[in-house]
Image (cartoon, rainbow, N blue to C red):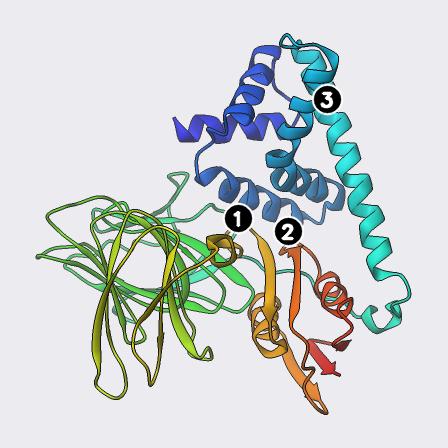
């Protein structure tokens, strides 16, 4: 069923829907009943267009991906103003087009307003955003470059295939239990479906170690970097993630783990269900906690486990193809930039001491991200090749 909805939206993007299908698109948007996989699938479609160098097609698809949640509000308002009864499909689609034009116009207006007076010469050397891609290393040391134009890779019955059913171009069937390693380089993301059906979205510069099939009492994997997990339910076999001193144990739920080695803390953010956290710091102190939805467990190398209420949209921003900064210092912001754009960050002079905030699409070139940051007045940037110079 989820795949049918994804294909329906693809037809909508390509303007191939019948009147009945357009009606269904509207109903899905209005009810908010689209599957979690929709944004990811459409993102992969956008990546394909980016690869082909079709800028117009890219922006059409990205606009559809990023504003369809907002359009329904504008459409609903127009429905009330035009007719208390439900409008025809033609009126709905006209409303969608009008709302899209309004949003794109205001986006253009705000963009130019925010960047007025900024010297654009410093951004003449621009850097494109990251894209889908990963490598899968088998236990025998052989590495497979996973196709970035596919939606993801599936490991099932000791065999590898892409989400569309096509092969990976290599006979990679495991004759016995093996440990696989999925790696995303800086500037890459990828989705991996594990042998039990668990889906894992890997952020840039991340690594996931997992078996070719699960057996025994627990389903064990290991993470370095950041990933979002949708764990397949299995009450008899807990799913356990080892991540830089933190152990996350679940039966079936949705959560995000940020465990980059260059961050001061490891964070697990729960979106749905519940998880049990166990930790052991470098001082040998062990702690345990249960997370509820909307909570985050953090662990510093020399500290204990701390649980707090958080805004989960911040933890989920990367998966939703956004940068969201909220009172971040310059170094934490630039670490995100460094991973996604695969750049070297160089600080010139004293560090900017402002707290940075803002929101920008991860589909944007790096110059757009830097402009958002520069509007705070706390930092200045210069791009030289794949180096970004930061000054106060």
Kindly tell me whether residue 210 is visible in this rendering. Answer: yes
CA gap, disc 1 to disc 3? 33 Å
Q: Residue at x 61, y 74 (%)?
A: 334
For disc 3, the marked residue is 95
Q: Where residue 338 sits: x, y (%)?
A: 59, 73
For disc 1, the marked residue is 149
For disc 2, the marked residue is 51
Q: Residue at x 49, y 31 (%)?
A: 6
CA gap, disc 2 to disc 1? 8 Å
Residue 373 appears in which quarter of the rendering?
A: bottom right
Position of the C terminus by quadrant: bottom right
Residue 140 appears in which quarter of the rendering?
A: bottom left
Q: Residue at x 53, y 57 (%)?
A: 318
Q: Where residue 312 sits: x, y (%)?
A: 46, 54
Q: Are marks 2 and 1 in contact (CB under 8 Å)?
A: yes
First in residue order: circle 1 vs circle 3: 3
Q: Where residue 222 sits: x, y (%)?
A: 28, 67
Q: Is residue 84 left or right of residue 103?
A: left
């Amino acid at each position: 069923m989820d795949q049918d909805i994804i294909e329906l939206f693809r037809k909508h993007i390509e303007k191939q829907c019948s009147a009945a299908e357009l009606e269904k698109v509207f109903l899905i948007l209005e009810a908010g009943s689209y599957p979690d996989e929709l944004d990811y699938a459409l993102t992969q479609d956008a990546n394909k267009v980016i690869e082909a160098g079709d800028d117009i097609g890219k922006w059409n698809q990205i606009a559809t991906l990023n504003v369809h949640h907002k359009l329904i509000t504008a459409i609903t308002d127009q429905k009330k103003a035009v007719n208390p009864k439900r409008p025809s499909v033609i009126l709905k689609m006209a409303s969608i087009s009008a709302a899209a034009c309004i949003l794109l116009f205001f986006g253009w207006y705000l963009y130019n307003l925010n960047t007025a007076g900024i010297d654009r010469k410093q951004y003449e050397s621009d850097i494109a955003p990251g894209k889908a891609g990963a490598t899968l290393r088998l236990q025998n040391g052989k590495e497979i470059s996973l196709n970035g134009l596919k939606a993801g890779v599936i490991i099932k019955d000791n065999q590898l295939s892409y989400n569309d059913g096509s092969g990976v171009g290599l006979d990679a069937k495991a004759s016995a239990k093996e440990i696989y390693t999925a790696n995303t380089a800086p500037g890459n993301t990828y989705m991996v479906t594990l042998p039990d059906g668990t889906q894992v979205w890997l952020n840039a510069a991340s690594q996931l170690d997992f078996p070719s099939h699960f057996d025994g009492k627990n389903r064990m994997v290991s993470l370095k970097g950041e990933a979002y997990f949708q764990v397949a339910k299995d009450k008899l076999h807990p799913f356990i993630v080892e991540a830089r001193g933190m152990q996350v144990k679940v039966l079936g739920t949705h959560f995000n783990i940020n465990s980059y080695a260059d961050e001061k803390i490891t964070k697990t953010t729960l979106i749905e269900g519940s998880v049990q956290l166990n930790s052991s710091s470098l001082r040998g102190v062990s702690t345990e906690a249960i997370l509820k939805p909307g909570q985050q467990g953090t662990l510093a190398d020399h500290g204990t486990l701390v649980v707090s209420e958080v805004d989960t949209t911040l933890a989920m921003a990367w998966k939703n193809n956004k940068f969201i900064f909220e009172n971040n210092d310059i170094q934490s912001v630039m670490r995100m930039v460094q991973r996604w754009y695969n750049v070297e960050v160089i600080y010139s002079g004293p560090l900017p001491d402002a707290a940075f905030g803002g929101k920008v699409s991860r589909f944007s070139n790096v110059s757009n991200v830097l402009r958002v940051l520069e509007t705070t007045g706390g930092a200045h940037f210069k791009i030289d090749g794949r180096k970004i110079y930061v000054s106060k």
